Image (cartoon, rainbow, N blue to C red):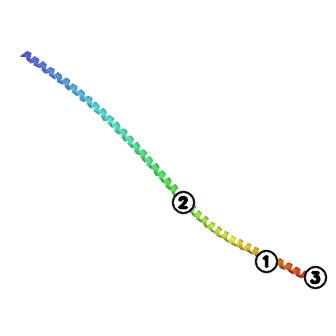
Amino acid sequence: QAEAAEARCEDLQQAAKTREEERSLEREAFRSQLHNLKEELNSAHCSEISAEAELRAALQAAQRSATEAEMQAKEVAAELASCREEGQQASLRANAAEERFAKLEAGTAQWKEVEKSLKDEVLEARRTCESHKQLIRALQQSMAEQKQQ
């Protein structure tokens, strides 16, 4: 019986040792899994931080682009207003030039009428002068004929 008890005791000790080794292996496996999970968590945290930094940088770049676009839009609006003002001034100058041209054209038409009238008067004066010359010659001839008689 003592031998059987001793064998049983050895079997129990062997079983306990085997269980302890199994538990040790399980603990080691759990520790390894825990370590891997911690590394995965750290990696995810780093990725999250990196993604947040990229997002902030992209947001800042977008804000800068929006600000630049707004400034350009304001510049374009100012240039457009300036162009409109210049266009209105040019239109006013064109209208004034057209009015001056119309007045000059009317004046030119008047001068042409005056010129035609003067040419007509000159022509009439020449005819009258020629007629008077003929009368004077006729008178001179008539006086010469009277002297001879």
Relative to 100, residue 43 above or below: above
Q: Amino acid at mark 3?
A: Gln
Q: Are marks 3 and 2 in contact (CB under 8 Å)?
A: no
Give the number of the disc on residue 85: 2
Foreground tag (3 vs 1): 3
Q: Quadrant of residue 118?
A: bottom right
Residue 121, position in %: x, y? 74, 75
Give the number of the disc on residue 128: 1
For the N terminus, give its image quadrant: top left
Circle 2 crowding by C-alpha within 10 Å: few under 14, some 14–19, many from 20: few
Residue 51, position in %: x, y? 36, 40
The residue pinned by badge 3 equals 148
Q: Amino acid at mark 1?
A: Thr
Q: In 3D space, how far apart are the residues under numbered discs 3 and 2 (Cα atoms)?
A: 92 Å
Relative to 126, residue 42 above or below: above
Helix, strand or loop at mark 1: helix
Q: In 3D space, how far apart are the residues under numbered discs 1 and 2 (Cα atoms)?
A: 63 Å
